[in-house]
Amino acid sequence: MTSVHDRIKSEVDSNDVVLFMKGTPAMPQCGFSATVVHVLDHLGVKYKGVNVLADPEVREGIKHFSNWPTIPQLYVKGEFVGGCDIVREMFENGELRPFFAEQGIALEAA
């Protein structure tokens, strides 16, 4: 059986942009997750949403994986970027769009 750490690592490694969140991109289940979804959708970022509410092991495991206590958590090209406050701040400061460009993440016109 695969450990939760290995399952999380597999998601992070096999997707350029992954958002571990409460709910789904179509239906976020908390305001913080909804904020990050809104920012990513506004920028036209293609990403995979992982609903931590559907799997209690992942919900707890992601906190240990990143050493970050809160959800949502955004990963880009295998690296932890941050949670809602960091993503929102990067967006408001105009840093998020260039960050995605530097990572080679295409943004679609929103």
Image (cartoon, grey):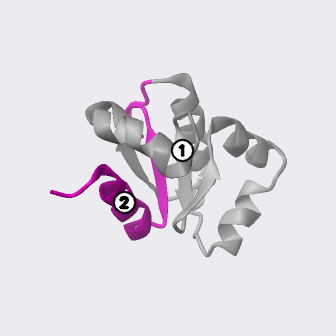
In-image side of 51 versus 100 (left or right): left
Residue toward you, 38 or 57: 57
In-image side of 106 versus 91 (left or right): left
Disc 2: which residue: 11
Question: Where residue 73 appears, x then y in whole percent?
Answer: 54, 44
**Mark earlier in primary sequence (1, 2):** 2
Residue at 42 percent across and 31 percent down: it is: 22
Question: Which of the 4 image quadrants contains residue 20?
Answer: top left
Q: Amino acid at mark 1?
A: Gln
Question: Which of the 4 image quadrants contains residue 13?
Answer: bottom left
Residue at 64 percent across and 72 percent down: it is: 103
Q: Is residue 7 above or below residue 68?
A: below
**Per the image, is 54 magenta?**
no
Q: CA distance from mark 1 to mark 2?
A: 13 Å
Question: Where residue 45 appears, x then y in whole percent?
Answer: 55, 57
Tag 2 secondary structure = helix
Residue toward you, 18 or 66: 66
Question: Where residue 78 appears, x then y in whole percent?
Answer: 51, 66
In magenta, the rendered stretch is 1-29
Residue at 60 percent across and 33 percent down: it is: 35
Q: Is residue 84 above or below residue 45?
A: above
Whether residue 40 is visible to the viewer of this picture, yes or no, is yes
Whether residue 24 is visible to the viewer of this picture, yes or no, is no
Disc 1: which residue: 73
